[in-house]
Amino acid sequence: MTTIADRTTSITPERGEAPWAGHEYVRGWGVFGLPFDSGHVLALRVFPQNSFAPYVTVWHRDPAGRWSIYVDGPRVDIACPRYYGKACDHVGYAKIALTWTGPSTLRVTVDEPQLEWTVTASQSLTLRTLNAMAAPMPLWTWRPSWLLKMREALARSLGMGRLELAGEMPSGHFGILMPQRMFYVNESRAILDGTDLGKPTRLPENPELGGVPLPARGVMAIGQAMWPITDRDEYERTRAETAVIRL
């Protein structure tokens, strides 16, 4: 049986072109969002494949609602802050290490701030069935708005709250998020700068970053995302500047 660890580690680093013309893209996996009962929220993005260069980011929201994104990659402006940075209180670099300690258990460490985070993902029978159906669906099914709305309604029925799979990012880019396999995160422990963040929880309202809702419960996802290129000159310049980065 193919494990979650197998599926994520099989995504090899690749700098490429988006499947849709006129777009920039990312492909990979991560913890879509994970609320804790302490009021903290964590998220993880691992995108070995994208338009510029591979990167990993960890997102953190403190109980006061302040967001930070930490980037392990060659440039902040080609990673998640490219789309979400304007809504953050802090964006910076960090060394992020990922280790699969089991077929569905991930250990994440960050050097600064000091974070020790373990995540165990799982599938219910319903989610297993939906993943088997969703993964092979062609990319064109992410274009019609009515199909996106159906997927969002399905996410609500699975306890993820009011997700929006398409919409405007804080940067002004219009993004389409395409989770093709999803897994629940019901088991997790995180210690941030010596503070235990508590237990995973389901929130009555979705946490938001710059108006973009994250799941109301812990979710790991494998998939991709695409954004129409808003500034062709900037895109081509950034592509040229990152062409020499080793994968």
Image (cartoon, rainbow, N blue to C red):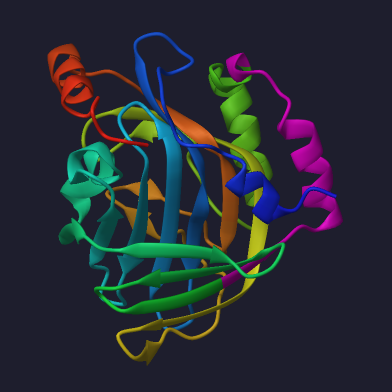
The spot of residue 29 in percent (x, y) is 53, 46
Question: Is 31 drawn above or below residue 232 in the view shown?
Answer: below
Locate residue 59 relative to residue 171 in the image: left or right.
right
Question: Is 91 drawn above or below residue 194 in the view shown?
Answer: above
Give the quarter of the image for residue 26.
top left
Give the quarter of the image for residue 121.
bottom right
* Start-end of magenta stretch: 119-140
Q: Nearer the viewer, residue 196 or 162?
A: 196
Q: Is residue 24 visible?
A: yes
**135 in the magenta segment:** yes
Q: Nearer the viewer, residue 72 or 175?
A: 72
**202 in the magenta segment:** no
Quadrant in which the C terminus is drawn: top left
Question: Is 89 drawn above or below residue 136 in the view shown?
Answer: below
The spot of residue 71 in percent (x, y) is 27, 54
Q: What residue is drawn where x is 36% and y is 90%?
A: 195
Locate residue 233 relative to residue 218 in the image: left or right.
left
Locate residue 139 relative to residue 244 in the image: left or right.
right
Q: Is residue 158 visible?
A: no
Q: What residue is drawn where x is 55% and y is 76%?
A: 200
